[in-house]
Amino acid sequence: MTKGLFITFEGTEGSGKTTQLRLLAALLNKYGIPHIVTREPGGSRLSTQLRRWILNKLDYKLMPQTELLLFLADRAQHVGEVVEPALKQGKVVVCDRYSDSTLAYQGGGRGFDMKLLKILNQAASGLKPDLTLLFDLPVEAGLRRALGRGQGKDRMEREGLQFHKAVRRVYLEIARKEKGRFIVVNANQSREAIYHEMIEKLIDRLPVAKKGKKRA
Ligand code: T5A
């Protein structure tokens, strides 16, 4: 069976990962690499509804357990409906947030036990990313960027600084433990500088590199 490449983008609020994800997708397009771009929450048909309840329905108090289980339900559906079929077709799947978001936000931010979260992540989907790009920057800088969009705050963005610092700490811990999977990119710089750092660290792991060599 042909297997694609599963790349996830992670980071705290306003890290600029979505901006970089779009740039990477443009590069894949340029080289004619078959790929899909997707996100969590939000990648499956069910997600549109779930996303509204998890992030945007702010007049409704969600229990932390409910929030956690909704993210996991979203993942189970998203992986089965979108991610796995694309990987089976040999595509590159570029996904904005995945299971490390659950560890960082529900573990670091909400304080759920890490062992429990790992078991639940596994139950929702045993699929591990091949590569994870972590866009790292001080949380204050990221929150300023996120607010600068002028779209108002979602459920997570309403949390205090301590919450977001704990999220960042967990991300960095996971990245330290899983050096083979993680690429940490300094997100506290211009869009162009982030892009160059990302491509420099990523290029040898992409099918683009093989295509480029063939052409050369
Ligand atoms: N979540 C998710 C959990 O708690 N558990 C889970 O299991 C999962 C899957 C998702 C939320 O759900 C939580 C985490 C999140 O809080 P979302 O609405 O999907 O929320 O949004 P985010 O994933 O947070 O991502 P965004 O697309 O909103 O923001 P990004 O990716 O951080 O950043 P981006 O690229 O949109 O940029 C933000 C702003 O900064 C500017 C951009 O133009 C934009 O205005 N910008 C820069 N400004 C200055 N310098 C740069 N280098 C810049 N790069 C971008």
Image (tube, rainbow, N blue to C red):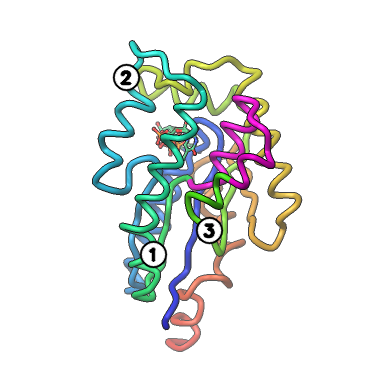
Q: CA distance from mark 2 to mark 3?
A: 29 Å
Residue drawn at x 68%, y 38% as measured from the top left: 114
* Three-letter code, disc 3: Gly
N-terminal label among 1 and 2 = 2
Residue 15's place in the image compared with 140, above or below, is below
Q: Secondary structure at mark 1?
A: helix
Q: Which residue is mark 2?
A: 57
With 179 as the anchor, is 185 left or right in this view? left
Q: Which residue is mark 1?
A: 84
N-terminal label among 1 and 3 = 1
Q: CA distance from mark 1 to mark 3?
A: 11 Å
- Crowding near the residue tagged with mark 3, few <14, some 14–19, many ≥20 C-alpha atoms within 10 Å: some
Disc number lying in front (2 or 3): 3
- Crowding near the residue tagged with mark 2, few <14, some 14–19, many ≥20 C-alpha atoms within 10 Å: some
**Is 193 inside the magenta-drawn segment?**
no
Residue 189's place in the image compared with 65, above or below, is below
* Three-letter code, disc 2: Lys
* Three-letter code, disc 1: Glu
Quadrant containing the N terminus in the rendered view = bottom left
Image spot of residue 149 (x, y percent)? 37, 25
N-terminal label among 2 and 3 = 2
